[in-house]
Image (cartoon, helix red, strand yellow):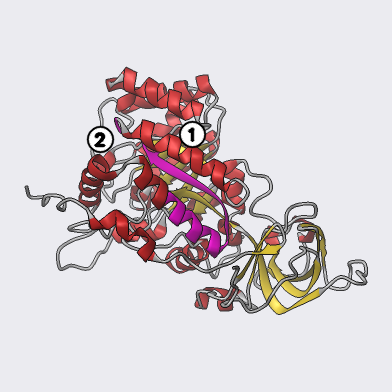
Amino acid sequence: MISHSHSFLSVPKDGSYRIVNARVPADLVPVLAGAPAIDGITDCELIVENGKVQSIGAPNTLPATPGLATIDLDNGIVMPRFVEVHTHLDKSHIWPRIQNENGTVLGARKAIEFDRERRWTADDVRQRMDFSLRCAYAHGTGAIRTHIDSYGKQTAISFPVFAETRAAWKDRIALQAVALFPTTVTVRDEAQFRNIADIVEKNGGIMGGVTAPGGQLSDTVDQELDRLFQMAAARGLEVDLHVDETTMTHVRTLENIADAALRNRFKGRILCGHCCSLSLIPEEDFKRIAGKLAEADIAVVSLPMVNMYLQDRGDRRTPRLRGVAPLHELAEAGVRVMVSSDNTRDPYHAYGDLDMLEVFREATRILHFDHSERAWTRMLGAAQAEQMGLEQHGLIASGQPADLVLTRARTFQDLLTRPQFDRVVLVNGRQIDTTLPDYRELDDLYAAAPAPAPALAG
């Protein structure tokens, strides 16, 4: 039985109605580009028929719709369903059985290694992935890209589970997967690298990798990146990398990536996540690197909640270095930028629920998206959808499915002050159940957990 007990309205079940007295972020509705807007929001009306947006326009400009039900939003904001471009569904929700003993990147990595080796069966990964997707779906997300740990035997376990999950969810959330492994594998273990590439290609995935894990620089990084880009090009794969997730300013592999992309004339999409040390380097170095990123058309995604959770940790001291990528300056240099959740309830981040509206709310505060002339509302999903090649996501347009999030918030200040727990989510014009799954569903994954990971000092 579908329950909408937390929703502020009920939408006709046939997927046909007119929405009046609505407001939309102007930059997320192409047909309204240039329309009068206050704080980036413009008034509009929508006609939805058989689950699709039939038309959208300024108030009192659309044709009459006799006999069609009317939904009055009382100036509430309407958004397209959200898009997440950087998550870790395979790691999610393991915190109750394996914690990060000191809150650092190293602590997270050791805990994950311990848990992955002992507990990541196909059933375990499948159950946690599905739980995560149900959370994201209830919050209003329509597309997700996840990184998949591709270490040893785990690659052959997790990618088939992802493929099954993608098929099961295809009518609700569009899914993409990226292979995650140290880029040193590309030159130190040719057989393993080819096996990863085979599995990625077979499952329609994306070539990934992490440069300088834990801030440990490799003296073969340029060779590693050449090998990675060449393999991706040969198989027609895109590239999505974890980069410089540290506040150590000498770790700057982002420039190596840009140089390698240009050197190899790579034509596919490239995304670099984290890029924490970029926020701390001298201005002249930043300008040079940003110029190369723009030339190579490399996009950058910041993961503000996780980066601030992990970076500059110390015992009984307040963090000074926050580690969020300089998105304002990158955008000014012509680099495409975006934000996303990253980890949820695992040793890399003890919190989070795959709620993109929460990510945007926190990013606005952390990265100062407010008091800016730039169209940061694209960070809700349009920028991510473009990076993922998903044309029907992140925007509201005629002829597309009515995949929408309706709120009572009338301004961005309203929208970002409260969590919008009563939001209404529409998928193909029909209202979905936004009841979140209960954590108790996962209790069986924790009950028989082996002893916790040994202390770092050991």
Look at label 1 and name its amino acid.
Answer: Ile
Nearest to viewer (mark 2 / mark 1): 1
Q: Foreground: 41 or 143?
A: 143
**Quadrant showing the N terminus:** bottom right
Mark 2 and mark 1 in contact? Answer it, CB < 8 Å.
Answer: no
Helix, strand or loop for disc 1: loop
Locate residue 182: give its quadrant: top left
- Magenta-drawn segment: 129-152
Residue drawn at 77 percent across, 64 percent down: 14
Where does label 2 land, which residue? 217
Q: Is residue 322 visible?
A: no
Q: Residue 206 — which label?
A: 1
Residue 444 locus on image (x, y percent): 31, 57
Helix, strand or loop for disc 2: loop
Residue 370 locus on image (x, y percent): 53, 69
As displayed, is residue 351 above or below residue 456?
below
Residue drawn at 62 percent across, 64 percent down: 432
